[in-house]
Image (spheres, coloured by chain):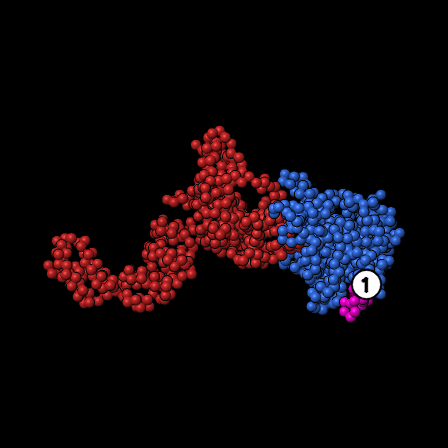
Chain colours: A red, B blue
């Protein structure tokens, strides 16, 4: 009987060489206060100088979200005092951000897609960090002035789970674009959520905002907690207080912040140090052309073009590098299903073992494709291929060389195999008899014995044929 | 005739002691410098150029590497700049030598230089009187012959008014043609780096060296040059309303008009409808921007920090309370007030609309005249303290100078006469990028009436 309205404010740290308004390096994890200069420290007399790379990446996101692009974007000053904000105002966008009125389709599985409207996308600068320790506060300004893109959704999400799915798929998308690494633990992707409930058909209720959500799972949990809390209050005839609450991940509850901050008047006004930004047509056209195929579209295409199952397509398109890898393998003649199976199975296993990313590993689409073609051609067994795959990771060698070095070439020579087969059949006369009487399944047992005797090198197709020949000839 | 007399190019070379001692001695009376230390400037100098060896003063709200940068405020006492403003660097790159930092009203807010937290600068014509402001130190240093030129900044008349009070030239260029990088912001959309000098050509050469687009200032623009080669025939003369100008200023203004007519210019009286809005619009926009620009001074990263603060918010609050002067606090409060959400339409946005209307009216007038003449300030240099002009009256008196800042148009203050022992100046305003027109008219006037030497002005170091 109650309807839930959830909106998200997502901040992503853009990957750029330098900060958004100065030439300091934009990197995570440097020694405190080493990536700073008069500009990002807010020294007297300095001015911001807009980073073109950050602008470009902002527009990529705007376009990926199908936003309307403002003809003129305006930077504004958001005024509030905080020790980690060098100028005590944040350069942001407010009335005229880069992008407005976009949408992002989330895939709820089973062919259900839900469209979530995007209110706006705006570029701003991040603040530094204040660390409290034993009654003393330390300030690290490395992060001050790093480019932050804020994406604000309309309250179109209906549950904690939908919010979690949104975040996961949104993260996937921005990683595809290569604009951020989307790491929520390191803070390169942050999320605040607002939620309200109301009786069906009565529109938005009074909302609360939840902060301190360091993973998409916490977003889900915190929202579910809030939905229950709202429901309880409203069912009992009470009223929700509009406020900001913090998620307490140790106790799995939200707590009221009760600070002055929530009642701030930011006194936005246009940043006089930056002229209005008018993106030119050629630039926008060039950015649009550089956009990559996004995960949801790619998943759909992989299902229709390569006949992958939904779950298989979802896995392969989950990361752009895997999807690219997959398509290269298909180009090299590997059957799509085979490529997908190996990528999601053994390759993933090896990556988990080595802790590497696919890109950084010794495995290339060419190497894996050639290996699988060897399996297809019966040159090596599937088990042997698994060993070679592991060896590629550790030895960084070509698969052909590893097959040779490890002695994994299959025995396809009929004479050699016939000898082994007749020995096995003779040693298991009772089994052979059973097979003659129709127990076909027992051939598998004899196959196992042949493989054991040849250390897995026997070509299974030939070996099976020879077993049958041997048994029925003797009969 | 050289643009700079020989004594200036040799002041810091052969026997710089003589020059240094001269300045220190003179400045005991004038109090124009907050920091006089030519050695630092010499250390920054590695090249020759058209200004080789020429000493100059820099207003202490412009950053010069290794020099202090106090903005005349306690909140920045002891602060040393780690970098140099682009405009200053361009002069250094042409051989000029910074000799010191000049006094100013705190953060450029004032018309007397008396709001400086450190000292009061005296007018070289009469030390009982102010040198004007906020670039009062720069104006007094030039008028006392301590440097041939000095840099100032002009947000609402801060170069032109002290130039007028001290009997020298003061140029406020078109907004954006000189980089603001290194100019401590008071009101970013109005602030301009300007020049105060003893002759027109000195201002002209310094301006031409300073101008240019700067990648560190995204609001800077390339100067396209004059559209008509700096030619001036028609001059619009703002009708001075009865009783607004002090009699001495009125007399001097009339004299300037006569001089222009004698030199063949066609003059024409004009009224500017929007003039009455200039002061309220200026104080709305300037204080709004100032309230944000001055938010960075909290004692946390640099500058004055209050002792024994209990928390970071106390530290910020107390440092600002103890570090800022009253005039600063007044303007921050005013600016915060006009920017409140829900009130912006009534104040800030409305002021921006009127600002556009003012610019449009000036642009229209420039279809009919080449430059506009108007007074700089309604009174001659006034006495220290508020016996003659209260701070409120001083603000009202900014009406003639603020127009050029609100429009962004270039303007120059030129000496017009000396009345009762005090210099008076007039102001010329030109369309954007037409500094050449200002120099052309100023040069013609200079022939008939060059910058008068103040009683303290000397042409030798002895
Ligand atoms: Zn920096």
Q: Give coordinates of residue B293: x percent, y percent.
A: 66, 49
Who is closer to the viewer here, A52 or A144? A144
Who is closer to the viewer here, B65 or A203? B65
> Is B18 one of the magenta-colored residues?
yes
Q: Which residue is mark 1?
A: B22
Q: Give coordinates of residue A209: x percent, y percent.
A: 51, 40
Residue extending farthest bottom: B14
Instruction: Residue at 50% x, 42% y: name it.
Output: A246
Name the quadrant containing residue B345.
top right
Q: Give coordinates of residue A412: x percent, y percent.
A: 23, 65
> Is B181 one of the magenta-colored residues?
no
Image quadrant in which the C terminus of chain A is located: bottom left
Q: Answer with left or right where residue B292 lies relative to residue A286.
A: right
Instruction: Residue at 37% x, 62% y: name it.
Output: A393
The kind of secondary structure element at disc 1 is: helix
Instruction: Residue at 60% x, 49% y: name it.
Output: A83
Residue extending farthest top: A237
Residue extending farthest left: A475
Name the quadrant containing residue B230.
bottom right
Magenta-drawn segment: B1-21
- Pointer 1: residues within 10 angstroms few (<14), some, or many (20+)? some
């Amino acid at each position: 009987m109650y309807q839930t309205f959830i909106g998200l404010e997502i901040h992503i740290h853009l990957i750029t060489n330098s900060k958004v308004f100065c030439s300091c390096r934009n990197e995570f994890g440097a020694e405190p206060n080493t990536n700073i200069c008069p500009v990002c420290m807010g020294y007297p007399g300095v001015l911001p100088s807009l980073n073109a790379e950050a602008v470009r990446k902002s527009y990529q996101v705007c376009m990926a979200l199908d936003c309307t692009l403002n003809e003129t974007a305006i930077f504004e000053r958001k005024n509030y005092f905080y020790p980690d904000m060098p100028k005590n105002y944040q350069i942001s966008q407010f009335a005229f951000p880069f992008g407005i009125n976009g949408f992002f389709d989330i895939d709820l599985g089973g062919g259900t897609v839900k469209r979530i409207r995007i209110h706006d996308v705006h570029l701003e600068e991040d603040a530094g960090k204040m660390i409290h320790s034993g009654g003393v506060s330390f300030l690290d300004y490395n992060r001050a002035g790093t480019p932050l893109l804020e994406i604000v959704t309309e309250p179109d999400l209906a549950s904690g789970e939908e919010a979690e799915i949104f975040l996961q798929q949104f993260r996937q998308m921005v990683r595809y674009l290569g604009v951020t690494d989307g790491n929520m633990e390191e803070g390169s992707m942050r999320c605040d959520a607002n939620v309200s409930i109301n009786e069906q058909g009565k529109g938005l209720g009074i909302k609360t905002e939840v902060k301190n959500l360091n993973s998409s799972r916490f977003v889900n949990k915190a929202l579910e907690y809030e939905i229950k809390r709202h429901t309880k209050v409203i069912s009992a005839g009470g009223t929700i207080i509009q406020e900001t609450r913090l998620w307490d991940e140790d106790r799995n509850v939200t707590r009221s912040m009760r600070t002055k901050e929530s009642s701030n008047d930011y006194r936005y006004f246009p940043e006089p140090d930056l002229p209005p930004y008018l993106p030119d047509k050629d630039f926008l056209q060039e950015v649009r052309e550089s956009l990559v195929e996004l995960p949801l579209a790619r998943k759909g295409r992989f299902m229709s073009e390569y006949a992958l199952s939904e779950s298989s397509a979802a896995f392969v398109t989950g990361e752009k590098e895997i999807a690219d890898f997959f398509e290269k393998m298909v180009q090299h003649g590997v059957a799509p299903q085979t490529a997908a199976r190996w990528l999601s199975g053994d390759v993933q296993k090896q990556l988990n073992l080595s802790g590497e990313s696919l890109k950084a590993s010794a495995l290339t689409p060419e190497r894996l494709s050639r290996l699988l073609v060897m399996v297809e051609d019966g040159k090596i067994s599937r088990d042997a291929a698994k060993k070679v795959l592991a060896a590629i990771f550790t030895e960084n060698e070509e698969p052909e060389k590893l097959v040779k070095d490890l002695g994994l070439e299959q025995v396809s020579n009929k004479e050699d195999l016939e000898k082994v087969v007749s020995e096995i059949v003779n040693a298991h006369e009772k089994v052979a008899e059973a097979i003659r009487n129709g127990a076909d399944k027992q051939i598998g047992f004899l196959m196992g014995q042949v493989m054991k005797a040849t250390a897995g090198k026997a070509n299974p197709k030939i070996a099976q044929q020879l077993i049958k020949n041997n048994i029925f000839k003797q009969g | 005739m050289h643009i700079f007399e020989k004594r200036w190019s040799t002041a810091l070379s052969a026997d710089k002691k003589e020059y240094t001692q001269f300045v220190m001695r003179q400045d005991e009376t004038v109090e124009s410098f907050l920091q006089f230390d030519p050695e630092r400037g010499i250390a920054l100098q590695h090249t020759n150029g058209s200004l080789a060896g020429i000493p100059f003063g820099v207003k202490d709200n412009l950053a010069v590497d290794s020099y202090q940068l106090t903005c005349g405020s306690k909140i920045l006492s002891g602060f040393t700049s780690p970098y140099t403003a682009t405009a200053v660097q361009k002069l250094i790159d042409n051989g000029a030598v910074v000799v010191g930092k000049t006094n100013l009203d705190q953060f450029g807010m004032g018309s007397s230089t008396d709001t400086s937290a450190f000292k009061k600068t005296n007018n070289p014509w009469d030390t009982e009187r102010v040198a004007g402001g906020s670039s009062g130190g720069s104006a007094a240093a030039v008028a006392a012959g301590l440097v041939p030129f000095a840099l100032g900044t002009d947000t609402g008349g801060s170069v032109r008014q002290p130039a007028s009070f001290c009997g020298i030239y003061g140029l406020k260029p078109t907004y954006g043609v000189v980089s603001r990088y290194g100019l401590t912001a008071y009101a970013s959309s109005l602030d301009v780096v300007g020049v105060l000098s003893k002759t027109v050509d000195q201002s002209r050469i310094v301006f031409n060296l300073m101008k240019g687009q700067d990648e560190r200032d995204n609001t800077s623009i390339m100067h396209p040059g004059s559209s008509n080669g700096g030619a001036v025939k028609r001059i619009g003369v703002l009708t001075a309303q009865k009783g607004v100008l002090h009699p001495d200023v009125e007399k001097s203004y009339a004299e300037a008009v006569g001089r222009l007519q004698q030199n063949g210019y066609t003059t024409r009286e004009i009224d500017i409808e929007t003039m009455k809005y200039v002061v309220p619009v200026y104080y709305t926009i300037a204080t709004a921007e100032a309230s944000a620009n001055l938010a960075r001074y909290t004692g946390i990263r640099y500058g004055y920090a209050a002792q024994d603060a209990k928390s970071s918010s106390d530290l910020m609050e107390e440092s600002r309370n103890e570090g800022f002067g009253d005039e600063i606090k007044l303007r921050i409060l005013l600016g915060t007030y006009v920017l409140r959400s829900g009130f912006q339409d009534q104040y800030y946005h409305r002021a921006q609309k009127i600002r556009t209307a003012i610019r449009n009216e000036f642009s229209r007038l420039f279809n009919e005249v080449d430059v506009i003449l108007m007074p700089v300030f309604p009174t001659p240099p006034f006495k220290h303290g508020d016996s003659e002009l209260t701070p409120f009256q001083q603000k009202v008196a900014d009406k003639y100078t603020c127009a050029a800042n609100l429009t962004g148009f270039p303007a120059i203050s030129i000496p017009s006469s000396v009345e009762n022992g005090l210099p008076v100046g007039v102001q010329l305003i030109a369309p954007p990028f037409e500094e050449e027109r200002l120099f052309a008219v100023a040069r013609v006037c200079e022939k008939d009436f060059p910058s008068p030497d103040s009683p303290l002005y000397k042409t030798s170091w002895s």
